[in-house]
Amino acid sequence: MSFHAERFWSAFQGVGMLDEASYQPPVGDLVVFSGGFKRPDQVVLDGMVHTTDYSIEYLSSAVELKRGFMITVAGVQYKVRQTPMANGNGEFVTALLEKVIP
């Protein structure tokens, strides 16, 4: 039995475990995709500062993000901080994000 990432991803989406995200390429239509959006808080500088590390995990077949691209999640814009990294066999990709302050 082979692994079908799309089947699992659609099941995760069906039970509300994924967020809808979008990317508008310079040319072409808006790309809407689902991803596991994470926003864990971290304490840095010996407890003096709280920061949030934003990231999104998505199917590599859904969208091809690159460093500097802008995406939107829940109406908030984020910029891809560095080249997204493939996970495992490459069917899933994680992009580190930074929140865009208007």
Image (cartoon, rainbow, N blue to C red):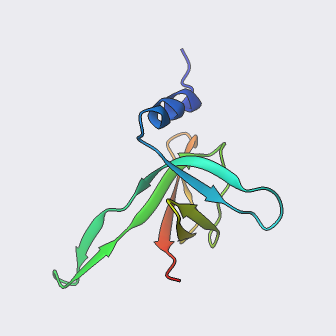
Vertical placement of residue 20 versus 49, above or below = above
Whether residue 92 is visible, yes or no, is yes
Name the residue at the left extreme.
Answer: 47
Q: Residue at x 31, y 62 (%)?
A: 40
- Looking at the picture, tell me which residue is in the foreground, 4 or 87: 4
Q: Residue at x 26, y 70 (%)?
A: 42
* In the displayed structure image, the side of residue 99 where residue 90 appears, left or right: right
List x then y, in percent, for residue 85.
Answer: 54, 56
* In the displayed structure image, the side of residue 72 where residue 66 appears, left or right: right
Q: Residue at x 71, y 63 (%)?
A: 24
Using the rendered view, name the quadrant where residue 62 is placed: top right
List x then y, in percent, for residue 16.
Answer: 42, 39
Name the residue at the right extreme.
Answer: 27
Number of marks present in the image shown: 0
Vertical placement of residue 57 versus 97, above or below = above
Q: Residue at x 61, y 48 (%)?
A: 33
List x then y, in percent, for residue 84.
Answer: 57, 60
